[in-house]
Image: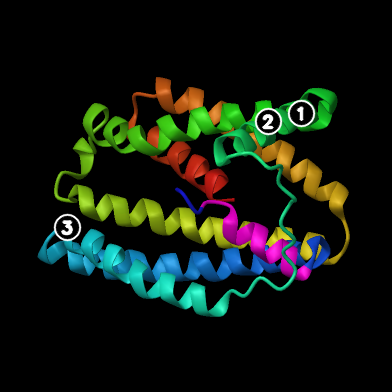
Amino acid sequence: MFISGSDSAWIVTEIGEEEADLIFLRAAQFGQFAALAGVFISMGLAAISPNIPLLLTGVLCIPLTIFLIMCMPETKFKPIAKEKNNYFENMLLTVKSGARLIKNNKIILSMVIIIGIEGIYSEAFDRLWSMRFFKDIPPTNIENCNTTIWFLIINLVAMLLSILLTEFVKRTLENKKKYRLTYVLILVNVAMMCSVIIFALAGNFYTCISILLVMLYNETY
């Protein structure tokens, strides 16, 4: 997404990094509850026509954009001084300076590698899990329950699990027990790696749905 990360950068710039942690977690919880309501609304609209939820969300992006333009003033943004070059040269200079920073900092380099691997994983998983689940391993034991209902059940359970975990992380940050948060992050990533392998190899419907919930739960987190 073109705007991905810009809203987060704006919030951090305006309120500072210390306050942003808890605000992001609280916002994630509100977002999860809104998504929970959105699942039921989308289900109702999809029962009329599958393309209605997509059309409606596209249309709603227009007033959302207008709202953000009016309500997101940048009071603390300080643009970086640019050289007297054209836009492409400035962009190239930014890329080069970023590459030098990554090269000279092992922590940032490790983060870039981890994020890159997670990006490769998520792109494949987000687009193919439904095909793998419903085409390769159809719910033959529950033939009367259609695919739309299964999407609803899976997303509802994953969202509820995510809401609970987000609340745990928020309380961890409030109690300043950040060492516990580190262990949670390690556990989440290990669970994700194991889940991807099991999901790819599993041939049983109930095994697949259990692993899928773990993966969606971790991904939302």
Counting residues from the start of the chain, the first of labels 1 and 2 encountered is: 1
Colouring style: rainbow
Q: Amino acid at mark 2?
A: Val
| Disc 3 secondary structure class | loop
Q: Amino acid at mark 1?
A: Ile
Rounded to the nearest angstrom, the CA distance separating label 3 from label 1 is 43 Å
**Residue 12, image x and y in percent?**
72, 62
**Residue 146, image x and y in percent?**
17, 50
| Disc 1 secondary structure class | helix
- Residue at image mark 1: 102
Q: Amino acid at mark 3?
A: Asn
Residue toward you, 25 or 200: 25
Residue 78 visible in image: yes
**In the rendered structure, are the residues bearing label 1 and label 2 in contact, judged by CB atoms less than 8 Å apart?**
yes
**In the rendered structure, are the residues bearing label 3 and label 1 in contact, judged by CB atoms less than 8 Å apart?**
no
Question: Which is more foreground, mark 3 or mark 1?
Answer: 1
Counting residues from the start of the chain, the first of labels 3 and 1 encountered is: 3
Q: Is residue 216 magenta?
A: no
Q: Is residue 6 magenta?
A: yes
Using residue 70 as the reference point, say whether residue 105 is left or right of it: right
- Residue 211, compared with residue 174, is above or below; it is above
User: Residue sitting at 39 percent across and 54 percent down?
Assistant: 155
- Residue at image mark 3: 51
Q: Residues within 10 Å of mark 1 (few under 14, many from 20)?
A: some
Using residue 148 as the reference point, say whether residue 178 is left or right of it: right
Question: Which is more foreground, mark 3 or mark 2?
Answer: 2
| Quarter occupied by residue 19 | bottom right
User: Residue sitting at 61 percent across and 33 percent down?
Assistant: 89
User: Residue sitting at 34 percent across and 32 percent down?
Assistant: 128
Residue 206 visible in image: no
- Which residues fall within the magenta stretch? 4-15
Question: Which is more foreground, mark 1 or mark 2?
Answer: 1
